[in-house]
Image: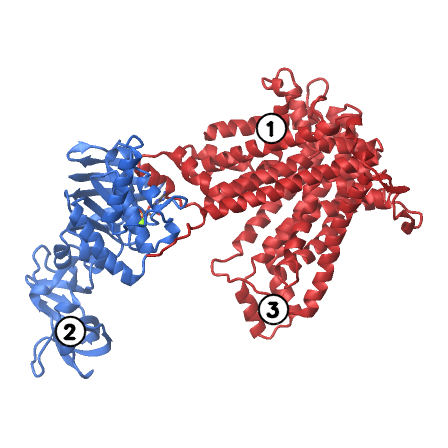
Chain colours: A red, B blue
Amino acid sequence: MALLYCACAVIALIAPLGVLAWRSVSGPDGGITLAYYGRYLSSPSLRRSLIDTGVLGGLAIVSTLPLAFLFAYGLERSNIRLKGALAAIGTLPLLAPSLLPAMALVYLFGRQGLLTPWLHGHVIYGAGGVLLAEVVGAFPHAVILLRTALSAADGRLYEQAQMLGASPWRIFWTVTFPAARYGLVSAAMVVFTLAITDIGAPVVIGGDFNVLALDVYKQVLGQQNFEMGAVVAMLLLAPSALFMGLERMAMRRQSAMISARSTGFVASPSRLRDGGLWLGCGAIALAIVGLLAVCQMVALVKMWPYDLSPSATSYDLGRYDGGWISILNSVELALAVAVVGAAVAFAGAYVTQRTRGTPALRHAFSLMALLPAAAPGLALGLAYALFFDDPANPFHFLYGGFAILVIATVTHFYTVAHLTSMSALKALDPEMEPAAAMLGRGPATVFWRIATPICAPALVEIALYLFVNAMTTVSVVVFLYPADFKLASVAVLNMDDAGDMGPAAAMGMLIFYVNLAVRIAGQWGAGVLRRRLAPIPQASRG
Amino acid sequence: MLSVQGLSKRFGAAVALDGVDLEIERGAFTCLIGPSGCGKTTCLRVLAGLEPATSGVVLSEGRDITGLSAAARGVGMVFQSYALFPNMTVSQNIAFGLSRKTSPLVRQRRVDELLQMVGLPGFGARRPVQLSGGQQQRVAIARALAPEPRVLLLDEPLSALDPQVRERLRGELKDLQRRLGVTTVMVTHDQAEALAIADHIAVMRAGRVEQSGAPQDIYDAPTSAFVAGFVGAMNLLPARVSAAGVVEAAGLGSMAAATAGFAIGEAVQLGIRPEAIVLAPPGMADGVGARIHRREFLGAVVRLDVLAGVGAVPLLVDVPAHCAPLSDDALRLVLPPQRLRLFAVD
Ligand SMILES: Nc1ncnc2c1ncn2[C@@H]1O[C@H](COP(=O)(O)OP(=O)(O)O)[C@@H](O)[C@H]1O
Ligand SMILES: [Mg+2]
């Protein structure tokens, strides 16, 4: 089994990335050359985008972290009201394609934006707009990581500090902040990687502002220059890999900080603090809901922003290439990715963690399973295009089909699915397999009859994560989808590009609603499964 | 019936078992004891067939079963954590190892019978989390017994329980074992537990069996200072054989002891149990002088921590509570020669 998993990992990840790296250095005569890198770095406009990408990532960190920290702090360390609603709203951007916040900003502050007059002659296109859109997109990811870091507070430290007479301000800087530092580092790495690898926002709102991701996109789709595309993808891959590596290290430190004897933290009542936090968190939540509401309004009016009378013409999606079918296609892909991905990742985690043969292979696979997090979607997509397009490749038959979309998407989001499975399985007594073996049952029985039922809630959550991401992703699939199988997220991009504002907004919001419905249903299902594992109620005790 | 010969087990460079020889009698309750990390669990897992041995053989009724799988050995095992399947009810747990070919009705009857046997009738529909530690342990035993194994292996089945529950359950465990007559091997690091319930004890140390025998023999006639110190309390003093039948204990002086097997002039360890030391009646000039340094009231006995002889050698002395000296004044101790034991220095 471990061998099978390693083989799959090589075909689905290592080999394509290897081909990507190879193509970026192989000259027309078959030798190795750095000419493409030279050409890239000597072109002033391309060099400019390399620098701009770095600056964008840095600014995204600086702007996202304070907001996310405030939000997470409000949810974890205060007594503000409506925490549940705020927390749910904070994660809403995850359900929409990354283009959507950028589109909303254009509707508000673009050339024909509703609020553009407020900008006194400026428009939002360019670096500022991209940055804003990236902040919205990365915000939920940062909040999730920071909430984990802040929720792991050790109540005993606070009691100790209070008994020593430290002021709240001093306690914040000497206890709270250091305890959350690894969470902050890991959030910073994730925000940076998301910001530099996103393709949606730069296309929609970038204007003349160029970034590496956009270069890959243009080189490949615009100029059919795969070699240059590969070069840029490699340049994009290096920092992502580095930063995701640092992120893993920070995560490990973070989890080591929660000692077994930590006690929970209960926020003391403080009106001033709670009032301030409520205002801050409320404003952020309002902004998120506002951006989504704007998109929905654009889809429902006759001619934004000139004629705001209601109209359903934007929903006449059949007129556009792809149209309604593309939503169905996306749902079909997302379902396949969710089911296949959750099953494969869970079984893979079971094999790596709980079987005993072939330790070297299992170790190799557990390392390879961490790699996808380091590979930007565009780089992976391009790598697939290069690898499977080659007629000499025995897997060439997959190219241009549904299967390759599923494989690429599962691979792209594999790391989270793998790690979630691993931690769910870790909660299982390590003596389950020996106990079953003593009763004449092998690991397969333990997998089906014990591990799977116990981890069912986690499996549902993994499937949810995969579904939502498969619905919204553009970068992995943009080079891979076949002409007769248009996807909704790509359709949004194309419609927006063609200036069809209303339909693009309508389609984007449809993706959002599908995801919202699936998430509500999925979380309800996970809750039911969790209750089923809880103790059976007893009518009579004794 | 079960016999282990020259069993060794290495994990990479670490040696967990280093030539274990063991005879397990049919129908007996055998305890493997020893300090933490001495290889008890590993020995049990090799017996169970969960772990392949590096070398050595396991024989069952003279038949070599070293290569057989866990399931094929007819052995049941209760794990330290009990390893009950949390998603299944008590009944489903117990039925897990029953043959899938038997009818549900027969299976249910067997489950009920086992629940009755371990004293948990009517608990079949519960989940493991709804049971106390002691109840979980009994479910684990029922599950292990379900396929009617010839040997039952238990790895520290009592260590996860409260001290009071532990004492009650060890009695019940012994009763159950005697009633069923199933050959049982139990691992424990608690020597008192082993002395209380075992028919046969094997003391392990660093991957070997240091001594094995009936509890009373191990207690009365330990063959090494290690076993003497591990099983029950033992005063161990550095000494030297000064002549045949005479030893010179450092700080205490010469005394009579059986020195057979030791050369004259050889350094030895002199051992005597706290309860074997006798207080000389007042006014007698026998024995060595001592004064009480500290006393511990243990209920039936008082344990005196005394400093004895010219060298103020620390000794433990147990006396029945009703004859404990009232004052901490000087007293005289007699070390009966027949209760002194000599051990080689290791
Ligand atoms: N799976 C394993 N891998 C490596 N070393 C092991 C393994 N299992 C046990 N050991 C080592 O073998 C020795 C004996 O372990 P064990 O049988 O568990 O001792 P006990 O049960 O007596 O406490 C220990 O030093 C332990 O570290
Ligand atoms: Mg052990």
Callout 3: helix, strand or loop?
loop
Report the Cα–Cα distance between label 2 and label 3.
Answer: 58 Å
Q: Along the horizontal axis of the image, is A317 left or right of A421?
A: right
Mark number displayed over residue A268:
3
Mark number displayed over residue A18:
none
Residue on which the image places disc 2 = B319
Residue A325 image point, x, y percent: 71, 27
Residue on which the image places disc 1 = A407
> In the image, what residue type sits under mark 3?
Ser
Closer to us: B37 or A295: A295
Report the Cα–Cα distance between label 1 and label 3.
Answer: 49 Å
Nearer the observer: mark 2 or 1; the answer is: 1
> In the image, what residue type sits under mark 2?
Val
Residue A36 image point, x, y percent: 75, 27
Which chain letter goes with mark 2?
A: B
| Residue farthest to the top, as pictured | A392
Counting other residues with Cα less than 10 Å from the Cα at mark 1, is it few (<14), some (14-19), or many (20 or more)? some
- Let me know if residue A412 appears in the view: yes
**Residue at image x 69%, y 42%?**
A194
Among the 4 quarters of the image, the one containing residue B113: top left
Nearer the observer: mark 1 or 3; the answer is: 3
Q: Quadrant of the N terminus of chain B?
A: top left
Above or below for A10 versus A281: above
Residue B275 image point, x, y percent: 14, 68
